[in-house]
Image (tube, grey):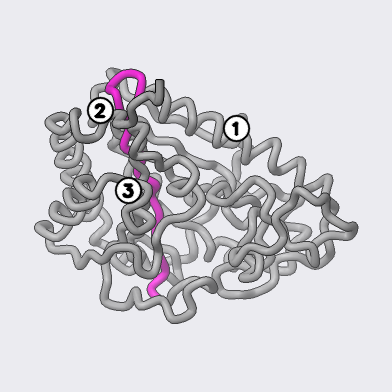
Amino acid sequence: MVSGPIPSANPANPASPIEVLDPARLSSPLVFASPHSGAYYPPDFVAASALELAALRKSEDCYVDELFADTPALGAPLLRALYPRAFLDVNRESHELDPDMFDQPLPAFVNTTSARVAAGLGTIARIVASRREIYRHKLSFNEAERRIAGVYKPYHRALRDLVNRARNRFGFCVLIDCHSMPSTGLPLDSDSGAHGVDVVLGDRGGMSCAAAVTDTLDSILSELGYRVTRNNPYAGGFTTQHYGDPGNGIHAIQIEINRTIYMDEMTLQRRKGFGKLKADLNTMIRGVSAFAATQHHQLQYQRLSAE
């Protein structure tokens, strides 16, 4: 492990809330997304928080975008969110909000009763992964709308465009939503069962992705020596639920990587195993791309018209 202070978050104000790393030549139906690795913390957000920056960063999926950064060289795009999930979580419905966080009643269309909201992890989170409260004061709904318009909507416009492009080009798309998991579990999973597991594959119990894709990922990672489980404790979030539509040729699966494999969870420093994990993930990408190339008939649009 490299010792030293907690690495700094990106100090630069990005021109866009997202970045799409596109291949020079699109040769794979895979699309990769990293919704929680953003590290730009707006100064006004940090000033409004009751927490120091180091505490806010504990909710990041640190370096996940770096782990998958070679995907363009392998023929597939990578979508990165540049703002952190503590600021706004794009792996949620657009308006999953806790009414107790706001200084006025929320509109009727807002989802205030989901399990994620109850856990403090809505579209705008109330707490960080360590369960500490983020804000000193209540927020205005206008502030929520500003973040949703400025960060959430551009992310999902880009993701939908990438998914549709892959499906139009290849007849189907395999969307891999990339995450890391803390070794001690998140508030939604206080008894997570993730101990001793390296990777969790979430396909919503087979609802968001063809079993053959999940089987292939499981097989490749297991052969590489990783301990893999499925749908426990992470079955997939909003992205897999919202985009996964196997009958229409869109297969969405979530991959959660145990952070202890590649980083120190306290210092946020990369471990020596970082490079090996990245190389193994590239092997996984090549393997699932090769599988997809031979299974067009199985993964493409399956539904027949009613006419």
Q: Disc 2 designates what residue?
A: 28
Identify the mark nearer the N-term, 1 or 2: 2
- Residue 236, image x, y percentages: 42, 56
Is residue 66 among what the camera can see? no
Label 1: how many residues lie within 10 Å, few (<14), some (14-19) or many (20+)? some
Of circles 3 and 1, which is in front?
A: 1
The number of discs equals 3
Identify the residue at horizontal 27%, vertical 56% (top origin). Answer: 274
Q: Secondary structure at mark 2?
A: loop
Q: Left or right: 112 with respect to 91?
A: right
Quarter of the rendering occupied by the N terminus = bottom left
Q: Disc 3 designates what residue?
A: 67
Identify the residue at horizontal 85%, vertical 53% (top origin). Answer: 140
Q: CA distance from mark 3 to mark 1?
A: 23 Å
Q: Are marks 3 and 2 in contact (CB under 8 Å)?
A: no
Q: Secondary structure at mark 1?
A: helix
Identify the residue at horizontal 17%, vertical 38% (top origin). Answer: 286
Q: Left or right: 60 with respect to 246?
A: right
Q: CA distance from mark 1 to mark 2?
A: 23 Å
Three-letter amino acid code at the position of disc 2: Ser
- Up the image or down, 8 lies above or below 175; here it is below
Identify the residue at horizontal 59%, vertical 36% (top origin). Answer: 17
Label 3: how many residues lie within 10 Å, few (<14), some (14-19) or many (20+)? many
